[in-house]
Image (spheres, grey):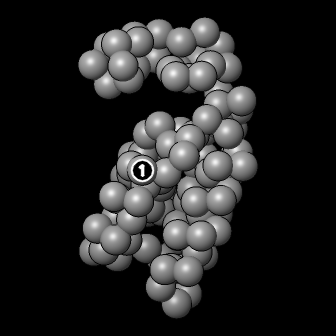
Amino acid sequence: MTVIIQVDVHGQTEAGYDGMLNLLADPLRQADGFVLHSAYRADDGVWRVLEVWRSKAEADRFFAQRVAPNLPPGVRPKRTLHQAHSLVTAAAAVAGVSHEAPGAVAGQ
């Protein structure tokens, strides 16, 4: 089932996030099950990352193999899983599919 992973990172800086993204963007794009990644500074000063994956197992595998080994000392992300009810994308973004049924992701 499609999942949304919310990651709150206390102590992360914009420069620190940008460094991680530079390192992980290409492997992330190629990861099995990856759909979307976005990040922003939340109102409470926490750096927040939102990702959409086809499954929890695929998200967990990428985090364990690629993210965790590259975290700076003292940075401890808090990951929260949310099961997606639906996913709507731009037609050009996912092989011409503009809306997916609840729990589905384009290509499944």
Specify the quadrant of the image occupied by residue 86.
Answer: top right
Identify residue type, mark 1.
Gln
Pick whichever, 38 or 27, lies toward us: 27
Residue 84 lies, in percent from the top left, at: 65, 27
Residue 45 lies, in percent from the top left, at: 43, 63
Residue at left offset 65%, top offset 13%: 102
Residue at left offset 34%, top offset 71%: 23
Residue at left offset 67%, top offset 20%: 103
Residue 90 visible at all: no
Q: Quadrant where the N terminus lies?
A: top right
Q: Is mark 1 on a helix, strand or loop?
A: helix
Left-right relation of 1 to 35:
right
Residue at left offset 64%, top offset 68%: 64
- Above-or-below relation of 6 to 64: above
User: In the rendered image, which residue does mark 1 sit on?
Assistant: 30
Left-right relation of 95 to 31:
left
Residue 54 lies, in percent from the top left, at: 61, 35
Residue 80 lies, in percent from the top left, at: 68, 51
Specify the quadrant of the image occupied by residue 108.
Answer: top right
Left-right relation of 57 to 25:
right
Pick whichever, 101 or 96, lies toward us: 96
Seen from this angle, which residue lies furthest bottom? 73
- Above-or-below relation of 89 to 25: above
Pick whichever, 12 or 87, lies toward us: 87
- Above-or-below relation of 9 to 34: below
Callout 1: 10 Å neighbours few (<14), some, many (20+)? few
